[in-house]
């Protein structure tokens, strides 16, 4: 019933990490659309959820939230299972991690906090970010780790 739209990867790009979640509406725990956050060796991608394989009207907008790893400036945990990703250009993306199994209802967000923390750690590692707000030395493979 629920599937994610296919990702468009470059030939030299590989997937390092994925996490199911959703983009919240403002500061609420309500979902605007379900997404699959994917970290590759080059980018942070968002693939929209498709219900019964049908494209969503927000699919282009969801894909537009994706960014190159070098463009990520900060990744910060927030309330519940939410995290905030900010680019060097000032763009901000809020993402709420959900449990890896099941439907992933908004009221399950408290149980997904460890998944949020792991997601923050993985994004920071892939982007070469050290402690919050600082940038670590670039590594040869784009900072991606498995």
Image (tube, grey):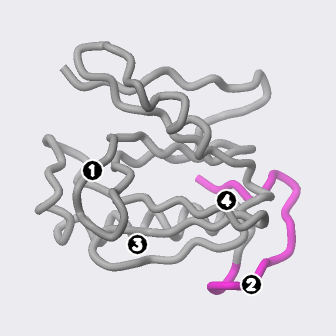
Real-space Cα distance between discs 4 and 3?
Answer: 14 Å
Q: Write the residue at 61% across / 39% down.
A: 64
Mark 2: few, some, or many residues within 10 Å (few <14, many ≥20)? few
Secondary element type, mark 4: helix
Side of 94 where 42 appears, left or right: right
- Say which mark, if any, is on residue 116: none
Real-space Cα distance between discs 4 and 2?
Answer: 14 Å
Residue 137 is inside the magenta segment: yes
Q: In the image shown, does 145 or 97 lie closer to the viewer? A: 97
Check if mark 4's residue and mark 3's residue have beta carbons within 8 Å: no
Q: In the image shown, does 15 or 67 lie closer to the viewer? A: 67
Q: Which residue is mark 2?
A: 134
Mark 1 and mark 2 lie on one chain; the one further toward the N terminus is 1
Real-space Cα distance between discs 1 and 2?
Answer: 30 Å
Mark 1: few, some, or many residues within 10 Å (few <14, many ≥20)? some
Q: Write the residue at 69% across / 54% down.
A: 144
Q: Quadrant of residue 55?
A: top left
Real-space Cα distance between discs 4 and 1?
Answer: 26 Å
- Residue span colored magenta: 130-146
Mark 4 and mark 3 lie on one chain; the one further toward the N terminus is 3
Real-space Cα distance between discs 2 and 3?
Answer: 18 Å
Q: Position of residue 19 (x, y in %)?
A: 40, 48
Check if mark 3's residue and mark 1's residue have beta carbons within 8 Å: no
Secondary element type, mark 3: helix
Mark 4 and mark 2 lie on one chain; the one further toward the N terminus is 4
Q: Which residue is mark 3?
A: 117
Q: Write the residue at 67% across / 26% down.
A: 9
Q: Which residue is mark 4?
A: 126
């Amino acid at each position: 019933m629920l599937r994610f739209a296919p990702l468009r990867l470059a030939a030299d790009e590989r997937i390092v990490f994925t996490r199911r979640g959703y983009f919240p509406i403002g500061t609420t725990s309500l979902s605007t659309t379900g997404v699959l956050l994917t970290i590759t060796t080059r980018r942070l991608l968002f693939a929209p959820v498709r219900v019964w394989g049908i494209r969503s009207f927000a699919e282009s907008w969801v894909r537009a939230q994706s960014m190159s790893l070098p463009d990520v400036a900060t990744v910060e945990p927030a309330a519940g299972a939410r995290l905030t990703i900010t680019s060097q250009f000032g763009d901000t993306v809020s993402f709420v991690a959900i449990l890896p199994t099941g439907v992933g209802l908004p009221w399950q967000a408290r149980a997904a906090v460890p998944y949020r923390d792991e997601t923050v750690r993985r994004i920071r590692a892939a982007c070469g970010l050290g402690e919050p707000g600082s940038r670590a030395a670039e590594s040869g493979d784009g900072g991606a780790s498995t």
